Image: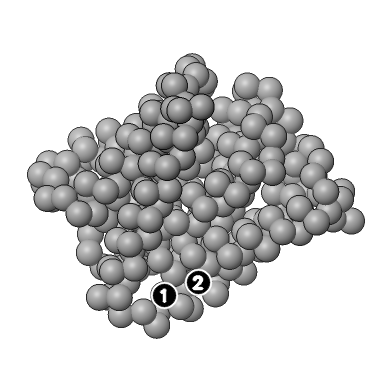
Amino acid sequence: MLELLSPLSGGLNLGLVALSALTSALSAAAGIGGGTLLIIVLAQVMPAMALIPVHGMVQLGSNGGRAVMTWRHVRRDIVAAFLPGVVVGALAAAWLLVRLPPGVLELCIAAFVLYSSWGPGLPQRAVGRTGTVIAGAVTTLLSSLVGASGPMVASFIKLGMSERLPRVATFATCMTLQHLTKAFIFGFAGFVFRDWLGLILAMVVAGFLGTWLGLRLLHRVTDHRFDFLFKWVLTLLALRLIWLGVQRLAG
């Protein structure tokens, strides 16, 4: 039965389902990190043409579940400002479907993440309505081209609020909107989701379980510990992106 989930082997399918639960728990507890970790692992075992669309649909289920579970904490004003940018970015991605030289985007995202975590704060207008629209457009475009824009979106969300539950809830909602566009973008481009549907659904279900466990852990983490964990998770992911970007540029 495991071999029927996707073109991959049964053992790989089982491992990816378990990984989906783990990464969803990480995202729920730390607010960020699961999606990037997931795509890094998927890239080791999945064909390149399937990587971003499959990852996008799994993350749609994971973030959608987290958004539903935390909907009372969502900052609707930020989401409302983020949405127009998502639409613009998705339209641009559907039109482009091209990439910068391998490695460049990873280095740009890593630089932004490190600056937002350790550098001086951005001016207040960067988290205003115009800045939010721009962030929605840019990160949606990046998400469709390189798969994981989560660290960049999380860095931006982090600038606009300090409380952990609204941060996690708003981040999950914004990422749900972004990943939803991939169904249309890659469907338009001709990707056959049917071949991977079993694996996607199994990973989404596992993601719901991981999200539930991660949210239980989130409630037990103090604000100080959460902020410390959040910053270091972002930093470690940024260092991973730098290593990956340099490797691809050198290759």
Q: From what the image shows, is residue 10 above or below residue 250?
A: below
Q: Farthest front residue?
A: 250
What residue is drawn where x is 55% and y is 72%?
212
Left or right of 80 in this view: 121:
left
What residue is drawn where x is 12% and y is 41%?
125
Residue tagged 2: 214
Residue tagged 1: 218
Left or right of 117 in this view: 110:
right
Which quadrant, please, contains the N terminus? bottom right
What residue is drawn where x is 76% and y is 53%?
12
Q: Whole-Å distance between the Cαs marked 2 and 1?
A: 6 Å
Are dots 2 and 1 in contact, CB under 8 Å? yes
- Mark count: 2
- Amino acid type at circle 2 is Gly
Q: Quadrant of residue 54?
A: top right
- Amino acid type at circle 1 is Leu
